[in-house]
Amino acid sequence: MRLSVFQKVLWGLVAIAIVGFVWLQVSTKGEQRTGEPAFRADFELTDHQGMVQTDEDFAGRWMLVFFGFANCPDVCPTTLAEVAAVMDALGSDATQVQPLFISIDPERDTPEQLAEFVPAFEANIIGLTGTPDQIKRTSESFRVYFEKIEEAASPDGYTMGHSSQLFLFDPQGGYVGAWTYGTPAEEIVADLKARMSL
């Protein structure tokens, strides 16, 4: 079976994301031994209702954070569907968790565009976007990779390559860990509940 150019690009992006995730785990292992989080959530962005939100607005709640874009053909909607399944499975504990979708495509992902995209998952996901500079600074603070890739078959002639892990931050905004793309919702729920009960 021959792969199309688009499929080859997607598989290449998955490989890059895996390498980036492994680097993230290795680079933060030493810091985590000290009991301090490897890094903290740090952002000031606009949500899908046009309100400015910062990491401090979610103090006291666990945060599930995923970086992606609304025109993503598969990885982003699949991950957000998993997040919705996680939130549903948490039951009453879901009030302690805030899922966030941070766009890495500010050129297309306006608050209005995100307002059409994130509510479709029915999980109280907040979509966040900003200026290109805000998105760049946010991605750097989260150690997330992304790039614009020319692709004639995609909307507006381009797609976005990006890291695909789902981040978890504690109620103080400290990084706790991440799940790779494709981790089943059941596994995430079990891990999250165990951490929340500590």
Image (tube, rainbow, N blue to C red):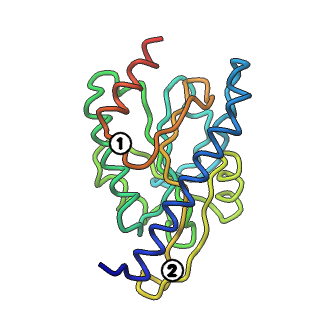
- Residue that appears at 30% across and 42% down: 84
- Give neighbour class at mark 1: few <14, some 14-19, many 20+ (Cα, 10 Å): many
- The count of marks equals 2
| Left or right of residue 137: residue 9 | left
Of 67 and 18, the residue lying toward us: 18
For the residue marked with disc 2, what is the amino acid? Tyr
Judging by the rendered image, the residue that carries numbered circle 2 is: 158
- Give neighbour class at mark 2: few <14, some 14-19, many 20+ (Cα, 10 Å): some
Instruction: Verify CB contact (< 8 Å) between mark 1 and mark 2.
Output: no
| Left or right of residue 28: residue 194 | left
| Left or right of residue 29: residue 70 | left
Could you say whether the residue bearing mark 1 is in a helix, strand or loop?
helix
Residue 26 sits in quarter:
top right
Could you say whether the residue bearing mark 2 is in a helix, strand or loop?
strand
**How far is mark 1 from mark 2, CA to CA?**
26 Å
- Residue that appears at 73% across and 19% down: 34
Residue 31, relative to residue 118: is it above or below? above
Across and down, in percent, residue 171 comes to: 55, 24
- Residue that appears at 37% across and 26% down: 95
Across and down, in percent, residue 127 comes to: 46, 52
Across and down, in percent, residue 43 comes to: 65, 45
- Residue that appears at 41% across and 26% down: 192
| Left or right of residue 27: residue 17 | left
For the residue marked with disc 1, what is the amino acid? Val
Label whose residue precedes the other's in the sequence (1 or 2)? 1
Of 189 and 70, the residue lying toward us: 189
Residue 92, relative to residue 104: is it above or below? above
Number of the label disc, if any, that sits on residue 83: 1
